[in-house]
Image (cartoon, rainbow, N blue to C red):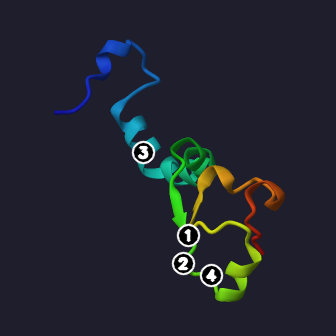
Amino acid sequence: MGFDFTDFQTEALSPDFVDWLIDEQWVDMQTHFSRLWDYYQNPMYSTKGLSAADAKLNDSARIYLQAQEMGLPARITGIKRP
């Protein structure tokens, strides 16, 4: 069952236009807003790929990094990134 666009009573919003937005524009928007969406969801990223030398540089003993920490400086998070 598709969405009924007659409730909007406008010619500017049509099923073809919405399909175009989803198919063509979603990729650009996802790329543009991915950091903002990650900040909102705050997923955890594993730091298992770090070598032993890199792990010794970090003050934190955690094996994960949260998305809201990505933009913060090392003096706050305790995690030094290259």
Q: Which residue has dot 2 on it? A: 48
Residue name at image x 30 percent, y 17 percent: 6
Q: Earlier in the sequence, mark 3 or mark 1?
A: 3
Residue name at image x 54 percent, y 78 percent: 48
- As helix, strand or loop, the secondary structure at mark 3 comes to helix
Kind of residue at disc 3: Ile
Q: Which residue has dot 1 on it? A: 63
Q: Position of residue 29 (x, y in %)?
A: 57, 47
Q: Position of residue 44 (x, y in %)?
A: 52, 58
- Residue 21 vs residue 27, the one in the foreground: 27
- As helix, strand or loop, the secondary structure at mark 2 comes to loop
Quadrant location, the C terminus? bottom right
Q: Which residue has dot 4 on it? A: 50
Circle 3 Cα neighbour tier, 10 Å, few/some/many (<14 / 14–19 / ≥20): few
Residue name at image x 60 percent, y 46 percent: 39
Q: Which residue has dot 3 on it? A: 22
Task: Report the Cα–Cα distance between label 2 and label 3.
Answer: 35 Å
The answer to whether the residue labelled 2 contacts the one labelled 4, judged by CB atoms less than 8 Å apart, is yes
Quadrant location, the N terminus? top left
6 is higher (above) or lower (below) than 44: above
Q: Earlier in the sequence, mark 1 or mark 2?
A: 2
Q: Earlier in the sequence, mark 2 or mark 3?
A: 3
The answer to whether the residue labelled 1 contacts the one labelled 2, judged by CB atoms less than 8 Å apart, is yes
